[in-house]
Structure formats: structure tokens, C-alpha cells
């Protein structure tokens, strides 16, 4: 067990108000570990700032692990899958059946995220959420009832291994870029076109239709509550499960790497409830989905990688594990000037 987590591990929630309360009272980073890590960084055998963002990344990780010389040994990757009733509006280039087919692919080890998880030593699990029962078409009604939202949040919460020292959440759900666009439009304003992209690769006519759907959904549901209420009205079960896992990681002080547009839309619903809810997270990458960069600006996150990825599945965040591993290896493994017998000037 990671030290200092015995009491919070038992926390759970029976209502959305209890979930909000957990977000508002979650422990912050360990400032003493942050100060000690920063001091250590200043003593390592390199010119000040020579490792650029790797230095800040290692200090950030140290502050959440509570250890001035942190180690990354047990990364966890969680993939959540859900189906969307808004698919009735023709918003995707692929049919809803692909969600279940890809879940089987994950389970058989054939997806990109399987290869990346294996490469960087991450424990991976996939959770399918009621694929036989899509959410409601949110152009007509809220996507989920409160009980359905709570069930999905709980699934994500329970999926987190409290002994993990890094968490990545990914998703699979045909139609979920429409959901993410609607959530962002509802939370941050602007026009539907500002937040709506091609997702799985819709053509121009498909993009126009998808933008119409987002606009109609936001006109119906926008301004009807906080981030969790927007998640209920405009989200999907997989987005809600990601949000539940993110919240559990925050409570357990497990650092996170965020994936693409859909993952970050889930994160945005938590940040809209509590401005500090995603302080334990760094953006693993910026995707090729048009609005992701704008969303990262709203979240206050600078991405580690920009490789034109747009797969989802947690793939961009998983790839960034390597960057984080490098940062931690240098910070914790390098000698100080005193240890190496090198003059620091």
C-alpha cells in the first residue's frame, strides 16, 4: 500500500452531492516533498534548467507521490467503453457495433493501447459499460439518469488500483467525440463549430450534421447545472467512468497523464465543479482533433507530446509514460555535485 492512504481508500459516494464533497475535500500535493525535490534538482550534476520540462515534470510527480526521490513502478491504464444514443443522428463514420468489437480487440491484446501499455510496463484493464443499452439521444433528453451517472462514476472509481503510482484513462465509444464537443460547448461557450471535429473521419456533410447535433444538444441542456450535470445530460457512460477514475486518483494522490479530446472533456466536467480537481494531472499529448488544443488551454495544461495522434484509447498518454519515466530516472538516479565530486562552480 502507498503510504498515507489508509483512510481515504474507504471513501465512496451514494449521491452526486457526496461526489462533489469528495472533490472539494481531496488532499493536495505534498508541498514538503515538492520543496525537497526542487532542492535536489538544483544539486544534480547538470547546469540549471538543462533538462527543461523534465525537471518540472519530476518535481510535479514527486509532490504527488510524496517522495523527493520518486519512482515510477506501477502505472495503470484503464479503458472504458460505452455506446451513445446520439448515434441515431448519424454523427459517426462507423457504426455503434464497432465499440463492442474493439472491446474484444482490447481483451485479446490487439489494439494500439495494448502494445503501448506493454512497452511501458503498465497494467491495463478494459471495462465495458452496458454496451447493450446506449445512453439516450441527448438532442431529445438527458443522456443519463442520475442513477446511471452514479453507476458509471462508481465503475471508474472502483477500477483504480490504490497501489498504482500513475493512472491513465482511455475510452472507446463510437459517437463520443460528439458528446465531448457538446460538453465543451456547454462549459466554455462559443459556437458549436468551435468544438466539433471530424472524430472518426466524417466528411464535410457529416461534420455539418455533427455540428448541428452539438448545437441542438447545447441549446437544450446548456446552463442547466454544473459540470457533473453537464456530464449527465451530454456525456456517455465511458466519459463518466473516466471522471470517476480521475476523482479516485485525486483522492488517492495518484498522478495522472491525460489523453486526448474525449478524456480531457471528462476532466473538464470535474474542473468545472472544483478548480483544483485536476491538479494531479498533466496532459500527455495534444491530439489532431481540432478542439483539443483549445480545451487544454481551458484546463491550463501544456501537452508533453504533439505527434498528430487521434486514436483515443489512452494511446497518447500511454506513449508519454516514456517521457515521465525519463524525467523520474534522471531526477532520482543522477548524482548530486557533492556525490559525484564535481565542482558546481
Image (cartoon, rainbow, N blue to C red):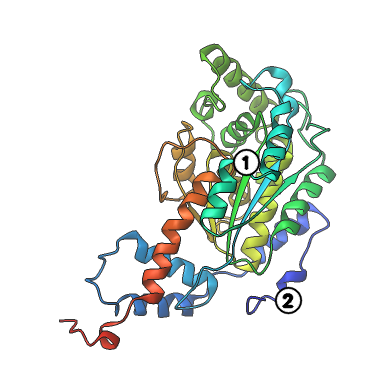
Residue at numbered disc 2: 7
Instruction: Assess disc 2: are there few (<14), some (14-19) or many (≥20) residues with their C-alpha within 10 Å of its C-alpha.
Output: few
Examine the rendered structure and indicate whether residue 75 appears above or below residue 332.
above
Question: x, y percentage for residue 274?
Answer: 61, 55
What residue is shown at x 48% (from left), y 56% (from top)? 321
Marker count (numbered): 2
Q: Is residue 116 left or right of residue 19?
A: left
Examine the rendered structure and indicate whether residue 270 appears above or below residue 286.
below
Is residue 226 something that shows in the picture? Answer: no
Give the quadrant of residue 50. Answer: bottom left
Question: Dividing the image into 4 quarters, which one contains the N terminus?
Answer: bottom right
What residue is shown at x 66% (from left), y 36% (from top)? 223
| Closer to us: 217 or 134 | 134
Question: x, y percentage for residue 164?
Answer: 62, 66
What residue is shown at x 77% (from left), y 54% (from top)? 154
Q: Which mark is residue 110?
A: 1
Q: Which mark is residue 157?
A: none
Amino acid at each position: 500500500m502507498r503510504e498515507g492512504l489508509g483512510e481515504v481508500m474507504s471513501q465512496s459516494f451514494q449521491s452526486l452531492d457526496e461526489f462533489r464533497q469528495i472533490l472539494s475535500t481531496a488532499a493536495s500535493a505534498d508541498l514538503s516533498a515538492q520543496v525537497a525535490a526542487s532542492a535536489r534538482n538544483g544539486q544534480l550534476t547538470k547546469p540549471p534548467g538543462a533538462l527543461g520540462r523534465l525537471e518540472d515534470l519530476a518535481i510535479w510527480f514527486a509532490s504527488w507521490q510524496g517522495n523527493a526521490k520518486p519512482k515510477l513502478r506501477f502505472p495503470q491504464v484503464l479503458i472504458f467503453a460505452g455506446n451513445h444514443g446520439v448515434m441515431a443522428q448519424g454523427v459517426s463514420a462507423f457504426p455503434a457495433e464497432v465499440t463492442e468489437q474493439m472491446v474484444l480487440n482490447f481483451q485479446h491484446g490487439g489494439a494500439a493501447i495494448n502494445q503501448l501499455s506493454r512497452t511501458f510496463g503498465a497494467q491495463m484493464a478494459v471495462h465495458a459499460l452496458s454496451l447493450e443499452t446506449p445512453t439516450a439521444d441527448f438532442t431529445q433528453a438527458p443522456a443519463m439518469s442520475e442513477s446511471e451517472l452514479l453507476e458509471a462514476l462508481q465503475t471508474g472509481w472502483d477500477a483504480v488500483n490504490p497501489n498504482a503510482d500513475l493512472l491513465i484513462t482511455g475510452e472507446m465509444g463510437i459517437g463520443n467525440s460528439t458528446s465531448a464537443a457538446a460538453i465543451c460547448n456547454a462549459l466554455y461557450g462559443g459556437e458549436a463549430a468551435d468544438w466539433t471535429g471530424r472524430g472518426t473521419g466524417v466528411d464535410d456533410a457529416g461534420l455539418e450534421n455533427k455540428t448541428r447535433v452539438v448545437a441542438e444538444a447545447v441549446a437544450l441542456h446548456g446552463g442547466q447545472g454544473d459540470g457533473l450535470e453537464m456530464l449527465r445530460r451530454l456525456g456517455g457512460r465511458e466519459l463518466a467512468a473516466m471522471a470517476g477514475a480521475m476523482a479516485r486518483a485525486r483522492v488517492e494522490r495518484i498522478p495522472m497523464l491525460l489523453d486526448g479530446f474525449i478524456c480531457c472533456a471528462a476532466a473538464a466536467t470535474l474542473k468545472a465543479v472544483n478548480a483544483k480537481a485536476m491538479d494531479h494531472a498533466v496532459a500527455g499529448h495534444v491530439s489532431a482533433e481540432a478542439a483539443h488544443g483549445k480545451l487544454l488551454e481551458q484546463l491550463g495544461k501544456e501537452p508533453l507530446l504533439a505527434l498528430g495522434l487521434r486514436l483515443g484509447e489512452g494511446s497518447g498518454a500511454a506513449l508519454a509514460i516514456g517521457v515521465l519515466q525519463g524525467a523520474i530516472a534522471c531526477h532520482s538516479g543522477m548524482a548530486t555535485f557533492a556525490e559525484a565530486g564535481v565542482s558546481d562552480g
